[in-house]
Image (tube, helix red, strand yellow):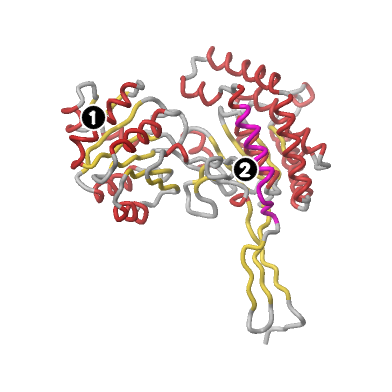
Amino acid sequence: MSLAEADRSIADIMAELGQKARIGAKALAIASPEQKRTALITAAGAINAHRKKILAANAKDMEAARDKGISKAFLDRLELTDARIDGIIDAVRTIAELPDPVGATIAEWDRPNGLHIERVRTPLGVIGVIFESRPNVTADAGALCIKSGNAVILRGGSDSFHSSHAIVECMLDGLHLAGLPVECVQLVPTTDRAAVGEMLKGLNGNIDIIVPRGGKTLVARVQDEARVPVFAHLEGIVHVYIDKSADLEKAVAVTLNAKMRRTGICGAAETLLVHQDVVTTHLKPIIEALIAKGCEIRGDATVMSLIPTAKPATEQDWRTEYEDAIISVKIVESLEAAIAHIETYSSHHTEAIIAEDPAAVEKFFNQIDSAILVHNASTQFADGGEFGFGGEIGIATGKMHARGPVGVEQLTSFKYRVRGNGQTRP
């Protein structure tokens, strides 16, 4: 924060951000598809050109985080590498090339009285994104909002402040070259937590949607205090169920990837359910593969009797998002029992079934009410980029408006256009 900003209250600073964002949103809502594409392609090029600066900024954040004794999972989410920057660039470029959603006709029909009615996509307005450690959210959220015609106010955590600032500068380069207001993408210039409170109040009506991306404490606060609608998931308690029809090779490979590829992301598996009919054939190979990668096993009585190094699973384990190399394992007597367990403990984020029986898969898909359901594939595909969205602004687990990865289409609402020729209602 500059000295001039330090002399002003957080409320005043945030109110001004809201006013500028509303002006930016009006310009962006009517921007041409080519303007938005140019802004994003330019931003991607700027990220590539300034990668050394971004990595240097991230190094500052990483050093400060280590000094605080931050967990390995947190550090993994915070860290940027050349490969991860390549991923950010690819995501922004992919979003740039997506079809422009604004003004697209979702449906149209004619009424008997001659009226022609169209339902068309329209931007939401101003989106507030509150996130913690992942610097890539800065680029993903900025790019998705630009593409969908929305202004965005980004409030990153103090741990990722330098990284986010360096990335936002690249986004602003793109907006400037495209002739769009730089106020379309704004980063909150303070790490003071009071700024979050101001955003949750809605900045005098200037924020239309809040998207939190972070841990349970952050998301719970947002859901409790926000005076505007929220796209959020509180936890990622993700299940993998090994059906009695499961192929052993797939079961081992998918479970290992779902848990251990990156343990700190919300799509990482936290609970493994194994059908009792395949305990003798499938359980040990799966568990041995997990242990070989350094995963701690917490199991029920059957698992404890078969896996000497397993620790006893408590009731709380079934309700825990570990975000670490730990998995809880339970033996279930049937598909129905697996579904019942998931419905009891799931956070409605992502669930997977490993099975070769089509009937079992259909029952799993039909009876479980989570945002993302996966068959014979890793739960770590629960990601907007992997869905072809280019990126995501978050994973929504609620049931209103958006659900699952929130991409450009989910960042729009719609309006009706009714065309007549002098009709009046009797």
Q: Residue at x 77, y 41 (%)?
A: 38
Name the front one of labels 1 and 2. Answer: 1
Per the image, the residue denoted by label 1 is 284
Per the image, the residue denoted by label 2 is 201
In front: 107, or 126? 107
Q: Which mark is residue 182?
A: none
SS at mark 1 in the image: helix
Quarter containing the C terminus? bottom right
Q: Residues within 10 Å of mark 1 (few under 14, many from 20)?
A: some
Residue type pointed to by label 2: Lys
In front: 34, or 319? 34
Vertical relation: 330 (above or below) 55: below
Splitting the image into 4 quarters, where does residue 300 fall? Answer: top left
Splitting the image into 4 quarters, where does residue 237 fall? Answer: top left
Q: Is residue 168 left or right of residue 338?
A: right
First to last magenta residue range:
85-102
Q: Residue at x 67, y 54 (%)?
A: 101
Q: Is residue 166 left or right of residue 286?
A: right
Q: CA distance from mark 1 to mark 2?
A: 52 Å
In front: 14, or 404? 404
Asked whether residue 97 is drawn in magenta, I would say yes
In the rendered image, residue 68, in percent from the top left (x then y), is placed at 52, 15
Q: Earlier in the sequence, mark 1 or mark 2?
A: 2
SS at mark 2 in the image: helix
Quarter containing the N terminus? top right
